[in-house]
Image (tube, rainbow, N blue to C red):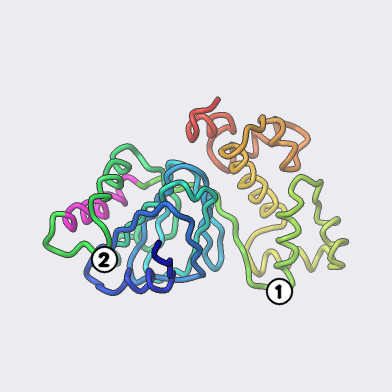
Amino acid sequence: MEEFKPALILEQVDRIPESAYIWHWKTEHHFPFHKHDKGQLTYVEGGVAFLYTRDKTYFLPARHYMWVPAGVEHYFAHRYPANFVRTIYFFRDEDDEQEPFYRQTGIYPVNNLLLEMILYTTKWDKDVMPGSNGYRFVKAIKKILPDISTSPLPINLPTTDNKRLQPVLRYINENLAEPLTLDSISTAFNISERTLTRLFRSTMDISFFQYLKLARMIRAMGYLLETEKTISEIAWDTGYNSVSAFSNTFFKLVGKRPSDFQLRETGKG
């Protein structure tokens, strides 16, 4: 088998600026933070993935795609290497400046039309050049994205490169089932509550409690899609003693009840 070289793939994507670059793969590849001169649509066929940018972590559930604008540093991780990862890197054109959609990182639902169009691109590989049928087809995909992608997934988790706050964030994410409070975190890291509050606000423009809530909901979404845990077990494992409190918080942030979210994404009730 040919050795996988991330740097070579990244170089090939941008080698011909005017082309669309299509890549479908079924093995797990690990990229460092990187960026492209082309906008990127990635659809993971089944399973769960995470998109990491320098300032946020995005949850990518099933039947959603991620859009990464040209020039945005990122990498993403998925947990099931047996699943196909389907990516289209789009050439730049005048729409990139005129349409706000193309300049915003986001996670969007994949409707049946878009899914069929993404799957149809498997007949092409690597560079698709202007003037070809493939190019016209890919351009049609790019053109419809703003119209069919009006409801981005409303939940993402901010992050920071602040050295003082990074270990705090790791601790929170490793202990989401525990009864975490501002007081308990302050004590664990020997930081005053006032200083910790200021750090969250100044580095990530979010409160400690908002961050904790988002982290728990993202973990819950993963449990709903990847495990056989019951709703009550998931509530407990994400730090909630009340199923109703968990369900209400989930609904406020995600827009669906946990059971409805699970049913839509997996077909499981």
Dot label at residue 139: none
Dot label at residue 163: 1
Q: Which secondary structure, mark 1?
A: loop
The crowding category of the residue bearing disc 2, from other C-alpha atoms within 10 Å (few below 14, some 14 to 19, many at least 20), is: many
Q: Which secondary structure, mark 2?
A: loop
Q: Earlier in the sequence, mark 2 or mark 1?
A: 2
The crowding category of the residue bearing disc 1, from other C-alpha atoms within 10 Å (few below 14, some 14 to 19, many at least 20), is: few
Report the magenta residues as a range: 134-148
Q: Amino acid at mark 2?
A: Phe
Q: Which of the 4 image quadrants contains residue 96?
A: bottom left
Q: Amino acid at mark 1?
A: Lys
Mark 2–mark 1 distance (CA, rounded to whole Å): 37 Å
Q: Can you give x and y, in whole percent of width and height, for residue 117 in the image?
A: 26, 45
Q: Identify the residue shown where x is 45% and y is 54%.
A: 27
Q: Which residue reaches farthest top?
A: 269
Looking at the picture, does residue 173 appear above or below residue 223?
A: below
Q: Which residue reaches farthest left?
A: 131
**Does the magenta stretch mainly form a helix, a strand or a loop?**
helix
Q: Can you give x and y, in whole percent of width and height, for residue 246 in the image?
A: 68, 36
Badge 2 is on which residue?
91
**Magenta span contains residue 108:** no
132 with respect to 15 (left or right)? left
For the N terminus, which image quadrant? Answer: bottom left
